[in-house]
């Protein structure tokens, strides 16, 4: 990586974070407080091939034709049904489009699992090993995948809390060290004064 000529160095330094569990074992991945543009592009490209949106829009069009409403209203009704909310079309919609609704639910469930795999693969490739593959991710324990996904989402939100916590701990250590030195000096002076 190129060393940039910063006039002021970034205050927060990346740190290695342990991800996993006692059952799964632990791996280390760098926490930076942000996602690089390459990491973002990798995930966006992978998400662009999502079939669930196509299924939802297709179902909304079918519902719009059946109930003679506009596609936007039909889409909102479908989303309400999928989310378990109250729909004006309610049970009738669920009965007439049972198969299509189940296909959407299945696809949305699969989509979440795919998204998790893509986020985990992204961090593995960009921060651990550029040769990491989908098969490598599929072989990981679920606790490790969950940890990588959590880290990805933190980085996506540009969360620097954990980086700040480490910096504050270091500052406290330095402050404590200075305090101990001062305390030792004072104690020595007191000992010398009490002897004389």
Image: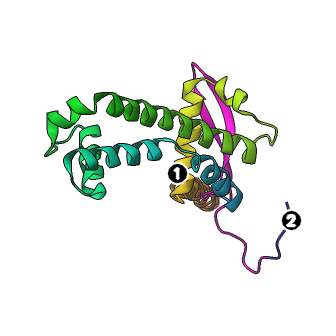
Residue 14: tell me if it is visible.
yes
Between 55 and 119, the residue placed more toward the observer is 55
Please determine whether, in this image, residue 92 is positioned above or below residue 130.
above
Crowding near pointer 1: few (<14 within 10 Å), some, many (20+)?
some
Quadrant of the image occupied by residue 191: bottom right
Q: Secondary structure at mark 2?
A: loop
Q: Secondary structure at mark 1?
A: helix
- Disc with the residue nearer the chain's start (2 vs 1): 2
Crowding near pointer 2: few (<14 within 10 Å), some, many (20+)?
few
Bounds of the magenta span?
6-35
Q: Looking at the picture, how far across and down is residue 90, in whole percent?
A: 15, 38
- Write the residue at 72% across / 78% down: 8
The residue at the far bottom in this view is: 7
Q: Which residue is mark 1?
A: 154
Q: Which residue is mark 2?
A: 2
Q: Is residue 8 left or right of residue 162?
A: right
Quadrant of the image occupied by residue 149: top right
Q: Is residue 3 left or right of residue 188?
A: right
- Write the residue at 76% across / 41% down: 128
């Amino acid at each position: 990586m190129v060393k940039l000529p910063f006039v002021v160095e970034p205050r927060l330094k990346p740190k290695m974070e342990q991800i996993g569990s006692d059952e799964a074992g632990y791996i280390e991945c760098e926490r930076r407080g942000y996602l690089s543009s390459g990491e973002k592009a990798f995930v966006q490209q992978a998400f662009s091939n999502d079939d669930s949106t196509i299924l939802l829009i297709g179902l909304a069009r079918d519902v719009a034709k059946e109930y003679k409403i506009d596609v936007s209203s039909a889409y909102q009704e479908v989303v309400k049904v999928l989310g378990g909310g109250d729909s004006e079309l309610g049970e009738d919609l669920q009965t007439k489009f049972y198969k299509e609704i189940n296909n959407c639910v299945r696809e949305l469930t699969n989509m979440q699992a795919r998204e998790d795999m893509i986020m985990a693969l992204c961090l593995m490739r960009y921060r651990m090993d550029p040769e990491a593959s989908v098969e490598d991710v599929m072989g990981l324990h679920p606790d490790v995948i969950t940890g990588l996904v959590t880290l990805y989402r933190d980085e996506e939100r540009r969360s620097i809390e954990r980086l700040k916590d480490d910096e504050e701990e270091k500052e406290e250590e330095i402050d404590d060290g200075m305090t101990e030195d001062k305390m030792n000096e004072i104690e020595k002076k007191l000992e010398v004064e009490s002897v004389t």
